[in-house]
Image (cartoon, rainbow, N blue to C red):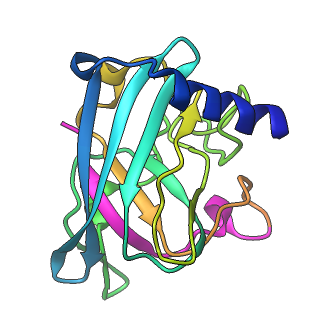
């Protein structure tokens, strides 16, 4: 795990990407009525090791929050069992290989949209880049949604499905 963090920090410090090789995604709060206020943006860039997600987010409860690429390019609310689902239009975690399994961002199995969790500091900010080695090209992400969840992520389907991240907090569509 320390090696993983060191690699992420080294990538961020090296300035691997150029402006033309980046995509910026605005994230807005997900509500039952639709998009809420902006919480900032995440810049996506290619590196030799996978796509780097660099957040510039604020106004979120401190702690660990699940972070994923979702299957659909929509942050619209939907209904499930007669109840509103904020950003339900995003669908489930992006799983183009149909693994049906939530797992670590760096292993060979599981959803390709499983990303390292974001850590929000005591002042509600997340600015630490995370690396997604399962995702090699920005073009693969176009038309999908980027999601921050209310809870953390243990990168497993046990004891809770999808890492236990729970409700969808903020969403943005990758253009």
Can residue 134 be seen from the camera position used here?
no
Viewer-proximal residue, 38 or 101? 38
Q: Looking at the picture, how far across and down is residue 170, in whole percent?
A: 34, 67
Q: Which residue is outermost to the front?
A: 13
| 161 with respect to 12 (left or right) | right
Can residue 117 be found in the magenta stretch? no
Which quadrant is home to the N terminus? top right
Q: Looking at the picture, how far across and down is residue 120, in whole percent?
A: 54, 67
Residue 9 picture quarter: top right
Can residue 171 be found in the magenta stretch? yes
Q: Looking at the picture, how far across and down is residue 11, in whole percent?
A: 56, 25
User: From the viewer's perspective, is residue 16 above or below residue 86?
Assistant: above
| 111 with respect to 91 (left or right) | right
User: From the viewer's perspective, is residue 173 above or below residue 118?
Assistant: above
Can residue 90 be seen from the camera position used here?
yes
Residue drawn at (36%, 34%), measured in percent from left and top? 44
Residue 65 picture quarter: bottom right
Residue drawn at (21%, 17%), measured in percent from left and top? 20
Which quadrant is home to the C terminus? top left
Residue drawn at (34%, 23%), measured in percent from left and top? 138
User: From the viewer's perspective, is residue 90 above or below residue 34?
Assistant: above
Q: Which residue is outermost to the right?
A: 2
Looking at the rendering, the stretch of residues picked out in magenta corresponds to 159-175
Residue drawn at (73%, 33%), measured in percent from left and top? 6
| 71 with respect to 102 (left or right) | left
Q: Looking at the picture, how far across and down is residue 16, in whole percent?
A: 45, 18
Residue 63 picture quarter: bottom right
């Amino acid at each position: 795990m320390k090696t993983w963090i060191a690699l992420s920090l080294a990538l961020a410090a090296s300035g691997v990407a150029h402006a033309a090789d980046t995509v910026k995604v605005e994230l807005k709060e997900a509500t039952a009525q639709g998009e809420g206020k902006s919480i900032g943006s995440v810049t996506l860039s290619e590196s030799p090791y996978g796509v780097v997600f660099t957040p510039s987010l604020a106004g979120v409860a401190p702690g660990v929050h699940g972070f994923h690429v979702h299957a659909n390019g929509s942050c619209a609310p939907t209904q499930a069992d007669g109840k509103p689902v904020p950003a339900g239009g995003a669908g489930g975690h992006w799983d183009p290989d149909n693994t049906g399994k939530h797992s670590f961002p760096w292993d060979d199995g599981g959803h390709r949209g499983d990303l390292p969790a974001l850590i929000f500091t005591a002042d509600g900010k997340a600015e630490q880049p995370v690396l997604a080695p399962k995702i090699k090209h920005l073009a693969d992400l176009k038309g999908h949604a980027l999601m921050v969840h209310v809870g953390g992520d243990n990168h497993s389907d046990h004891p809770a499905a999808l890492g236990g991240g729970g409700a969808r907090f903020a969403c943005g569509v990758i253009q």
